[in-house]
Image: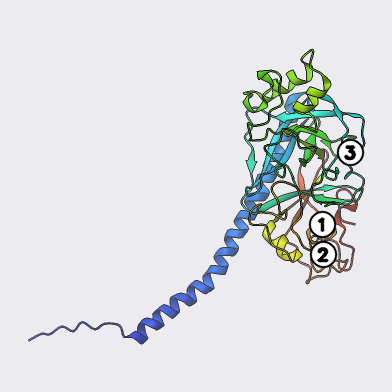
Amino acid sequence: MRTTSNRAFTLTELLVVISIIVLLIAVALPAFNAMLYSSESAMAEATLKGSVGAARDAAIRSGAGNDCAAVFLYEPGGRISVVACERVGVLNDQDLGNGGTVRREVFVPLAGFEAATLPKNFTVRGYAPAGSVDKNWYEISNGSGGLRYPLGQAAWVFPETGFYDKTAAQDAGRRQTFMVRFEGGTGLLKASANQAALVVAPRPSTTNRLVTAAWQRVDRASDLRRWALRVLAEPGIPDAVRRQLIGDISGDTALARPVSQLALCDERWLARTLGVRVDKATGCLYQSADAPRFVASANMTAARLSSALEGDVNFNGRIDFPDDVSEAKLLVIDAYTGAMNPVAIPAVGQGSNAAQQEGSVP
């Protein structure tokens, strides 16, 4: 007579199996995370290069005098987006920082070009050479929380296009960003400009629209290029009204200067390196969605930010291998081809101020 025996696992055997599974997961998880991070990093770089290249291609096709640019935007809690824009005219604008008036070029998003979005947590900063941060661009006195980037000094600036009161008709020049600009017809890089340009970026709110005619509502415009051209050229519109609609005082524009160097990195890595935390609400190193302010910490300064991005992650004033390992990618745009090339890391013991010279680390 045959008998069958149904033998179950003992508790000890079950615990051993579970332990082996947990051990395998513990070994495999870091490798999987590293693979995922590497993939996202490569995607972020490819997206950045592709969007800048698209703006250059548009500039070549547009013809002489019709410059195009890749403009960088950020909405708190969201992701960095890159928008291809075109130059449509010039506005006799108000100089909010110094008084008087100033002629500023006006850019609008190119029709038919969808904004490129970087993977979550990856951010881009533009290198502002010494002398470009002034009372209009990034450091206008508007009660936004004090100086983030010292006047006149070189800095890596962040797109501040989303840090303002979105319900206010006027933001007093609070929206700031940077662009990679190309000459119309040739595609040559334009890395400098006498004045920052105005970029039309309508705020989401429909309230507090200071308009005298229905067509002046930019939030209802189906064609931003046509709307901007009409604002700039429509007869009978007082200069004060034009400035309210499309000038630096408008809540629907951002002020942007051209740059030739970009820094791409994971904002979480940058925060850890600086000894601070990414703000949960904004998703970056700014702490308020209503005004551009760094997270509150003695470690959060423009100087330390530059050091971290440029490779001096232990903040001793020089690059020391293997102690200084930066995850940031510094990219310089070639003036003739528009190619984005990595900036060379300095030799051991050299200073970390990477962008004191355009195009290379001293």
What residue is shown with label 1?
Answer: 344
Q: CA distance from mark 2 to mark 3?
A: 34 Å
Residue extending farthest to the front is 208
Q: Is residue 21 visible?
A: yes
Judge left or right: residue 35 versus residue 306: left
> The residue under label 1 is which amino acid type?
Ala
| Residue 216 x %, y % | 69, 21
**Mark 3, residues whose alpha carbon is within 10 Å: few (<14), some, or many (≥20)?**
some
What residue is shown with label 2?
Answer: 312
Residue extending farthest to the left is 1
Q: Identify the colour scheme used.
A: rainbow
Q: In terms of secondary structure, where does tag 3 sit?
A: loop
| Residue 84 x %, y % | 70, 34
Please, is residue 16 above or below residue 349 in the view?
A: below
Residue 97 has which mark?
3
Residue at the spot 44% in from the left edge and 79% down from the top edge: 20
289 or 260, which is in the foreground?
289
Q: Are marks 2 and 3 in contact (CB under 8 Å)?
A: no
Judge left or right: residue 60 versus residue 11: right
Foreground mark, 3 or 1, reads: 3
> The residue under label 2 is which amino acid type?
Asp
Q: Are marks 1 and 2 in contact (CB under 8 Å)?
A: no
Mark toward the start of the polypeptide (1 vs 2): 2
